[in-house]
Amino acid sequence: MSWISASEDTGISVLTTIDAETGGQLILLGLGSGDVRVLSGISREQIGLIDTGGDTVNRILLADADNDGNDGIVVCDDAQIHLVDPATLTIEAHVPYGANDCEVGNVDEDAAFEIILSDGRVLEFDGTDTEIEWTYPGGEFGTLLELANIDDDPALEIIGASSWYYVTAFD
């Protein structure tokens, strides 16, 4: 199969796919305008547009960032994080923190998921309130983030790739 999407005037900054609740895949295009264009993986037609009202999209992921037990679409830009219902594509919350990259997972000993920002902040969001749980005293974790359990303990480690050519794992 071959297919080419329509051109995006503001540029595509992020590309990801997620499983659609109705079957198939959704193709999510993070745009320079701050919008997220949602395409059906089956028809490749646009089925939605998420207008975050924010800046260039830096990261899109599917995670339980608000600790309600359900995964949502998490859109990160430099100024804020937008939480989107994957079924309706409506924005449910804005978290007033942003960064070049973000991840969501449990990186400490409590049961809640944290939002990890590349600039070194670790947040906990309960759907209403945001708390900065801690900040890395050495500055940023890196320009790019991933989470992985690389030491077999209960918590995930923060893996940061720095723009100055190395990777650090934070436990």
Image (cartoon, rainbow, N blue to C red):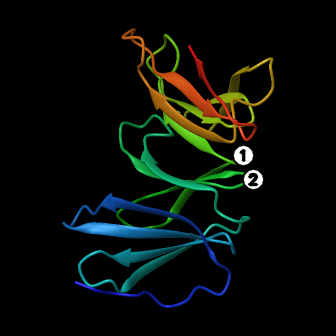
Mark number displayed over residue 109: none
Q: Earlier in the sequence, mark 2 or mark 1?
A: 2
- The secondary element bearing badge 2 is classed as loop
Quarter of the view holding residue 148: top left
Residue 101 x %, y %: 64, 46
In the image, taking residue 88 as reference, residue 127 lies left or right, namely right
Pointer 1: what residue? Answer: 99
For disc 2, the marked residue is 78
Q: Position of residue 52 (x, y in %)?
A: 63, 66
Can residue 127 be seen in this snapshot?
Answer: no
Q: Residues within 10 Å of mark 2 (few under 14, many from 20)?
A: some
Secondary structure under badge 1? loop
Seen from the viewer's position, the closer of residues 157 and 154 is 157
Callout 1 environment at 10 Å: few (<14), some (14 to 19), or many (20+)?
Answer: many
Location of the N terminus by quadrant is bottom left
Q: Judge by depth and name the residue closer to the eye, 77 or 82.
A: 77
